[in-house]
Amino acid sequence: MRRRLLHPLDRYVFFEFLKVMLATAFGFPLLVIVIDISEKLDSYLTRQLPMRDIALAYVYGVPDTMFLVLPAAVLFATVFTIGGFTRHSEITAAKASGISFHRFIRPIALGALAATGAGLLLAEALPPLNARRLELLQEKVFRNTDKRANFAYASETGRVYKIGFADVRESRIESVEIERPGTGPEYPSYVIAVKNGSWDAAHGWLLKEGVMHILPDSMSNVTVRFDSLRDARLTEAPASLMANPKAPEEMGYRDLGRFIEAMERSGTNVNKLRTQRMLKLAIPATCFIIMLIGAPLATSTQRGGTAYGIAISLATTVIFLMLLQLSQAIGAGGLILPELAAWIPGAIFAVIGSILLYKVRT
């Protein structure tokens, strides 16, 4: 097996593929940077950002762009590598010597798998870089807020807190309603309504000017008024109650999962975040899937040369990006499971690629 992997033909095919993929993976981010700067430079200058910080922020943003363009880089590398071999009759010569097309592209498949692994590693390495980039561009300053109104928060103990207003700086909440579902007279349901509450790091929340309704059953209601009440069950600090939306690129797969759970307890719709979390796995996996389409399509580039190869690559990339946007919209809208929506582009391309690869002349 080792001899087969180290076969001179395998090394030749692999390194030809690798050269094009690396050139594309590093070239696309530079193009994105130029376009992005032309659109946002005025905004950055309005914030009076130093040019050094702007330049450094874009350096930190290169890995994130590379992560997004990895599937396109694999596609371009596949199409141009196999297209070049086709035009120079190298694939024909390989077939004449008993090497099938499927065996010939095995090093390219290994390269695509390596790109998938690189994408997964990038997905976990990116959060601190993206956080630093947003800090340099002062994006967090414009996104964060210290106040929130009219929201619900479901604690891990099963209680639901409906909060009219919360202020992190003043550590207070107003118009609070607490519901605790019960099971019967021995463990009755109750509803607590309070005018306001204040936070003390040492003792937690102190709720003031309220009334408690104890509901042993549907026919009974015991009402108790109180001046103040210490809620030992509500342990979340004011900042935790805010659950401000964060950019998914600022968190790794596990951290984003924990953030989504916290957001769900605060009553926030997290379908979009769930879709974007799964894309951290789906986008790298597409590197291998998209190779299945590029390999058979590239065998026909002999007719149009380089221009034909570019057309195929660009058209496939545009279609993939459109499907990616569509899948995010479907997942965010809750039409299907968000995690399933993230795999729609990959599933479609996998089916088409498998059919094309099966039909190609070997």
Image (tube, rainbow, N blue to C red):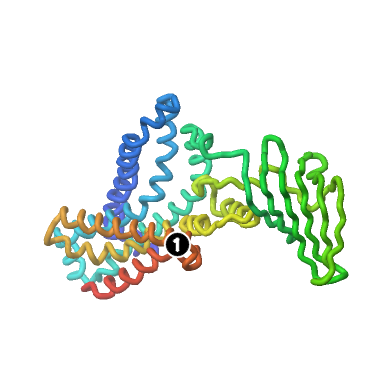
Towards the viewer: 82 or 239: 239
| Quarter of the figure with the C terminus | bottom left
* Count of numbered circles on the image: 1
Instruction: Identify the residue shown where x is 67% and y is 54%.
Output: 153
| Quarter of the figure with the N terminus | bottom left
Towards the viewer: 145 or 347: 145
> Where residue 94 sits in the image (x, y, percent)?
20, 66
Task: Report which residue position mark 1 lands on.
Answer: 342
On the image, which quarter does residue 181 sit in?
bottom right
Position of residue 268 relative to residue 351, above or below, is above
Instruction: Identify the residue shown where x is 79% and y is 53%.
Output: 233
Position of residue 180 relative to residue 243, above or below, is below
Query: Can see residue 8?
Result: no
The amino acid type, in three-letter code, at marker 1 is Ala
Instruction: Identify the residue shown where x is 40% and y is 35%.
Output: 58
Outermost residue toward the left in this view: 303
Position of residue 223 relative to residue 163, above or below, is below
Drawn side of residue 167 relative to residue 337, left or right: right
Query: Can see residue 62?
Result: yes
> Where residue 218 sits in the image (x, y, percent)?
79, 71
Towards the viewer: 333 or 164: 164
Drawn side of residue 268 relative to residue 2, left or right: right
Helix, strand or loop status at disc 1:
loop
> Where residue 278 sits in the image (x, y, percent)?
49, 59
> Where residue 56 sits in the image (x, y, percent)?
43, 31
Instruction: Identify the residue shown where x is 36% and y is 64%.
Output: 289
On the image, which quarter does residue 54 sit in?
top left
On the image, which quarter does residue 5 sit in?
bottom left
How dense is the environment of label 1, judged by Cα within 10 Å: few (below 14), some, or many (20 and up)?
many
